[in-house]
Image: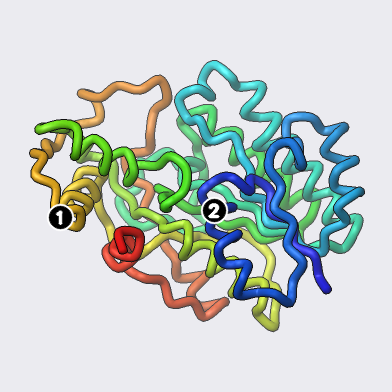
Amino acid sequence: MKKILVTGANGQLGSELAVLSSKYTQYKWVFADRTQVTLDDLGILKIQLNQIQPDVIFNCGAYTAVDKAETEKEKAFAINNLAVELIAKYTRENNTKLIHISTDYVFDGTSAIALDEDEETNPINIYGASKRAGEIACLKENPDSIIIRTSWVYSKFGNNFVKTMQRLMQEREVINVVNDQIGSPTYAADLAQAMMAILESPEWISGIYNYSNEGEISWYEFALRIKELGGYICNIGGIPSGSYPTPAKRPKFSLLDKKKIKDIYNLNIPNYKESLKKMFL
């Protein structure tokens, strides 16, 4: 029985994979939190991997505090780059399959068309830079890895934009949401299913892939959809990013082109409206 190790088990994607795992009982699943797989201590991490001896690693663990990363650069790079490098090296040496999760924040946001996997990267914040460094290290140490870039992740688990909006729309009469950052949300349950489809596919084609739900929207439009589905009466205003300054810059445009993953793995990717509705059910 093949053993799948999921890092970042308590995160949104890790939690959705845990839900999905009951449908894939042909695998032995190991869901590891930060104590069981310690991404910020390479010495311990190496020992842990050797003890677990997985056949497949879904590396969902990451440093994702985008604004905090601006002042915690060393920690962000330790988890998002150095740990990824070690995991990739381990998978190459032990003939282990690796799916590593990355981000749309590797781009600078200056494009006007959907970004494909070959688009030039140019991160504009520390988080994005650490994730891009991790991508490079991953493919260098193990060219047989699969990297999935995703964006605007949400689920019933953890902290995310949808849950924040649900709370604020019940607490406040008026909220403002940025209307000049364009992309597409990703329902973590859909991404988890896509990862299993790749693993179950008869052919393993390594490299970088994009995955998010279909649709091109702003955060403001996303908030309007959440309001509609939740039946909230809160008024929502659209504001420019400049009116809501954050320590880390965000890419203005990071819509991902999903043609490659759809063609190679024959995936049917739902529209964000369908997936958001699933979360509300």
Contact (Cβ within 8 Å) of mark 1 with mark 2 = no
Q: What residue type is labelled 2?
A: Leu
Q: Residue 147 carries which label?
A: none
| Coordinates of residue 77 in the picture (x, y in percent) | 66, 29
Q: Which mark is residue 13?
A: 2
Q: Which of 65 and 163 is in front in this view?
A: 163
Please, what secondary structure does the residue beneath circle 1 have?
helix
Q: Residue at x 36, y 71 (%)?
A: 270
* Figure quadrant of the N terminus: bottom right
Q: What residue type is labelled 1?
A: Glu
Q: Which of 273 and 114 is in front in this view?
A: 273
Relative to residue 192, is residue 104 drawn left or right? left
Q: Which of 108 and 47 is in front in this view?
A: 47
Picture quadrant of residue 29: bottom right
Q: Earlier in the sequence, mark 1 or mark 2?
A: 2
Picture quadrant of residue 47: top right
In this rendering, the count of numbered labels is 2
| Coordinates of residue 201 in the picture (x, y in percent) | 65, 79
Query: Is the residue marked by circle 2 packed among few (<14), some (14-19), or many (20+) residues within 10 Å?
Result: many
User: Can you say whether 41 is above or below 266 in the image?
Assistant: above
User: Can you say whether 177 is above or below 256 in the image?
Assistant: above
| Coordinates of residue 86 in the picture (x, y in percent) | 81, 42
Pointer 1: what residue? 228
Q: Residue at x 35, y 22 (%)?
A: 246
Relative to residue 56, is residue 103 drawn left or right? left
Mark 1 to mark 2 CA distance (whole Å): 25 Å
Relative to residue 144, is residue 161 drawn left or right? left
Q: Which residue is drawn at 53% across and 24% down?
A: 69
Relative to residue 202, is residue 281 drawn left or right? left
